[in-house]
Every structure is written in structure tokens, then in C-alpha cells.
Image (cartoon, rainbow, N blue to C red):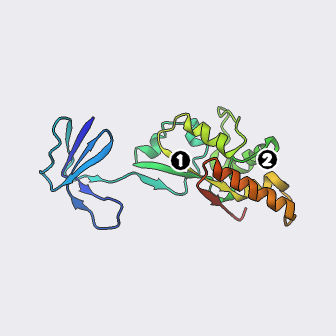
Amino acid sequence: MNHTFRGPRVVDGSGRPSYRADVVTKAGMITEITEPGQATAGAGRVMDVDGLVLAPGFIDMHAHSDLALLTDPHHVAKAAQGVTLEVLGQDGLGYAPVDDTTLRQLRIQLAGWNGDPEDVDWDWRTVGGYLDRLDEGIAVNAAYLIPHGTVRALVLGWENRPPTSGELDMMRELVAEGMRQGAVGMSSGLT
């Protein structure tokens, strides 16, 4: 469907000052940005949004929505504010990659941030498995950071000691595997 937004103040994410324009979209893609009153949209919905701001989606860089997206896939609290991307796995702790023991411990550790909802099917163990669960249908996009603390706990538990060279190699491989499965980076934290 075509949409014409007439007269909004456009904030385009480039860093330059906002400006008034008409914006035309077709099939969800911006096809035209013109001086106010100059759009040639043709058929479609025309919305007078003079006095409002039109901007690309916002990125929530530190959301802790790792479980919120699974329990409320519509994610209205964020989507209604224009958030279109949630970055997950912050602070070095998250829910993948895990084994049964590590997941049980992390659920307790992270309950203060994310709760521990009963209605989540905790069937994933890999980064790819967790991302597949998100891909079943959430209203926003998600980018996952492989949590260093989770990887460390998976390899050597919660022991306060340096890893052996073999354990360090295992951690490196878990991070590399998670990246191959779709993670966008790694997070760390002091906990």
C-alpha cells in the first residue's frame, strides 16, 4: 500500500537538523522525499502529519528484553514508541549459549532484570536456537550479543579462577559458533 505523509518534520538519522518535507512510501519503502506540498504519491493513503515528527525506527541499545520479546511478541510498550530494534544479551549475561545446568543458574541470576516467566518454553541451548525462537514472530527486530559471562559459566561454571588454555579455546569456539549462528557481537560485564 502507498502512503503519503504530508508536512512532517523529518529526522532522518543522518545527524543533520530536522526539516519539513512530504514523504511517500510504497510497499513499506520510502520512494520520495519532497518539499512540503510537492509529493506525487498518486493512489494510496494521504496523512496530514504537519506538526509531527517522522523518523526511522529507534534502536534500544540496552533493553534487557531477552524474555519480554518471547512473552509479549507484540512488544507494544516499545513498538508504540518507535523502537524497531532491540539489542539483547547485554552486560555479559544472557540466555544462550547454555546447557541445562547453566540455564537453570542464569534464570535465577537474571530474574531481577528479566523476571522468570513460567510461560516461556526454555527449549533452546544455542544462540541459533534462541534466535530461531525470536524469528517465530516478534514485532521488532532483535540483535543478539553473545554474553561473555554466560559463555564462561558454560565452560567453567561459576568458579572464580582464570580459564585453562583448553577452556579458553572452548570459549572462543562458542563465541565463534554463536557469531556464525547470527549474533552481531559479544558483550561483557563485571558480574
Foreground residue among 169 and 12:
169
Labels 1 and 2: the sequence-earlier one = 2
Residue 147 point in image, percent of width and height = 68, 56
* Placement of 79 over or under 162, stated as above or below: above
Which is nearer the eye, 80 or 97?
Answer: 97
Residue behind mark 1: 142
Q: Secondary structure at mark 1?
A: strand
Q: How many marks?
A: 2
In the image as oriented, which residue stretches furthest toward the front?
A: 180
What distance separates the C-alpha of mark 1 from that of mark 2?
23 Å
Q: Position of residue 4 (x, y in %)?
A: 21, 43
Residue found 64% across the figure and 53% down from its top: 179
- The kind of residue tagged 2 is Thr
Q: Is residue 135 left or right of residue 29?
A: right
The residue at which mark 2 appears reads as 102
Asked which quadrant contains residue 129, the reply is top right
Other-residue count near label 1 (Cα within 10 Å), few / some / many at <14 / 14–19 / ≥20: many
